[in-house]
Amino acid sequence: MVVPSLHCMNNTVANGGVDQELTTDNQHSMASGGSSMDNRRKSKSSVKSEKKTLKVESDDTHPVERRSSARIQKLKSEKASSVYRLEESPNSRPEQCSRKKTKVYQRRKANTHEGSEEVVGEAVSPTEGSSEAMDSDCVENGESTNPVLMEVAANGIVNDVSTTNVVEKSVYAKVKETLRTFNKYYLHFVQKGDAPEKDGRQGSRRPDLKAISKMMETNAILYPEKRFGPIPGVDVGHQFFSRAEMVAVGFHSHWLNGIDYMGQSYNRREYSGYTFPLAVAIVLSGQYEDDLDNSEDVVYTGQGGNNLLGNKRQVQDQVMERGNLALKNCMEQCVPVRVIRGHKSANSYVGKVYTYDGLYKVVQYWAEKGVSGFTVFKYRLKRLEGQPILTTNQVQYARGRVPNSISEIRGLVCEDISGGQEDIPIPATNLVDDPPFAPTGFTYCNSIKVSKSVKLPSNAIGCNCKGTCTDPRTCSCAMLNGSDFPYVHRDGGRLIEAKDVVFECGPKCGCGPGCLNRTSQRGLKYRLEVFRTPKKGWAVRSWDYIPSGAPICEYKGILMRTDELDNVSDNNYIFDIDCLQTMRGLDGRERRFRDVSMPTSTDDQKSESVPEFCIDAGSTGNVARFINHSCEPNLFVQCVLSSHHDAKLARVMLFAADNIPPLQELTYDYGYTLDSVMGPDGKIKQMLCFCGAADCRKRLL
């Protein structure tokens, strides 16, 4: 049910004289601070992936997926490059390099034009506006007539589609970013609601509505104009965790009404020929006593006439106007309607989760006396064919079912990879290999191990709070976080947004273990599973719903100095602690929310260019070592300081960037820079990415 490791395949491809080495090793090298929330910061670190084999009793041909230290690989790359340069004539080297790059370009052009070969590193067909389409459409007598590509050819810059064409974000990425914006505003208003007002009254009880108002004020609603038919980036089966989320995207534009419709204001040129109002979406959430839901065939009760007190009873007749008239017009004009079903869910703050069921057509309507004796309008809707199949009348799609116990797990190869060290067992499953095998080659640890060469700072002076920290104006730890707490109480503690660094309460603080400002120190609280994938090796997923901002796990292993790793050649599970680099926006890192009071020291200057410390999870580590890369991740990395305030030795935490449904693979962005690694022969190494994201960069290296 969960599968770990990186996206690469062993392959060496000669492309116009330039060898591109593609590996299947699990590249989990990472710079701390990489965040999906801040547009995935890219470090200028480099990574080298070497082919390894996993030693198993019955099969020793399975690749080990490992992370490599950015610093180590950079040093190796520089060393390899210098060796190569010694072998070349100083005068001939630039000329040869230019010839090779031009040759690559010509071959790419020929491949695209003739369709005879597949371009390495590009897993999608040419589309309108892409560099391939431009290349194919603008060729005369074997030469490109497109000025952009002619300039590219002249400069020899053709390594990958990403270097020649800036592609707009996919509709899925836009939906995800919009929901992240909503969740950020929502958690900010939750925090304000948790704090009492000046007059002693409690704050707002509807932070979701305040978040929607804020998005409207800032024009952050993704699709503010209503439209019928599908919404780009929202597929059948998509789950919203509140009706406010649907409003944020523009999927259903009212947080209360069951019928969303386009009124007379839409009666303009682009909709000429239609009679308004027209319904665009309905929510089936059991608000009416006369509703009848049989999945593919729905009898929907029109709007109006119920008492809105929660008992669903009708108190007066419904009228053929507004949404009721809009559904009638949809039937007469054959306009499809989006149908969303609401189900009870303890994971949602509104007590329900809303699943997009697909497009339905209104096939019939009538008026009748309802259960309570009042006139109601009924609409029969039938699901359009050709959409994903519903597996149950609860609209749970064929994405898998969460097991209730270990005995129900298919492909179980290990009941608990932690060996009882975690409070919650972490099973491992393998439905890929025959015979199946479990993760091996490491020792599990649930705490950081410290190398003998590392001297930890003394414990920081803590706050004087008692029991739990409640007032950010008097808590010294909160003052370091910009005079506020970074977490909210909801769902067991959620980080409001990614920050340069988060200061938590430590061993010398007066508060106890239940303090909100110790949220990341409480260990695993979600049921995680390690599972085998066909292309990425091992991966991780959760059996539980995870809300955005929730802590997932800490990256654990051996804390050591990076200069101790110079002789380590095959370890790809090394995580550089680059908190200082992230805070200062060095090496291309994107700055985060910086409302912290960071203690500084002269030693910090030594770590500006290269992180001084790292975490080695190669031989000793926890479940975090199995979490894969994605170009559109659902986790982000956050540096946390608790026992001390030395940013060079910050704890590395992984937090949820989105609301993550059960059984979705957990991923974060490793933040590598393309074409940054050279092999011993002086040629650039490349690694394909198999994350499957809509905006996948196609290459990890």
Image (cartoon, rainbow, N blue to C red):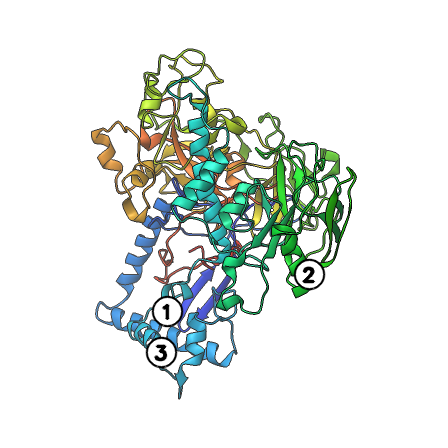
Instruction: Please state which of residues 507 and 181 is positioned toward the viewer in this rendering.
Output: 181
* Mark 3, residue position: 146
Query: Is 521 left, or right, of 675 in this rendering?
Result: right
Classed neighbour count for the residue bearing mark 1: other residues with Cα under 10 Å, few (<14), some (14–19), many (≥20): some
* Rendered position, 273 above or below 640: below
Would you place residue 349 above or below residue 133 in this image?
Answer: above
Kindly check if marks 3 and 1 are in contact, taking CB atoms under 8 A apart as contact.
no
Spot occupied by residue 425 in the image (x, y as percentages of width and height): 63, 30
Comparing labels 3 and 1, the label whose residue is closer to the camera: 3
Q: Which of the two labelled residues, at mark 2 and mark 1, occupies the earlier sequence position?
A: 1
Q: Say what amino acid the circle numbered 2 marks.
A: Met
What residue sits right under mark 2 in the picture?
A: 331
| Front one among 617 and 619 | 617
Displayed quadrant of residue 15: bottom left
Q: In whole angstroms, how far apart are the C-alphas of marks 2 and 1?
A: 53 Å
Measure the C-alpha gap from mark 3 to mark 2. 49 Å
Q: Give x and y (percent) for residue 33.
A: 38, 40
Is 197 or 577 nearer to us in this picture? 197
Give the x, y percent position of residue 53: 55, 49
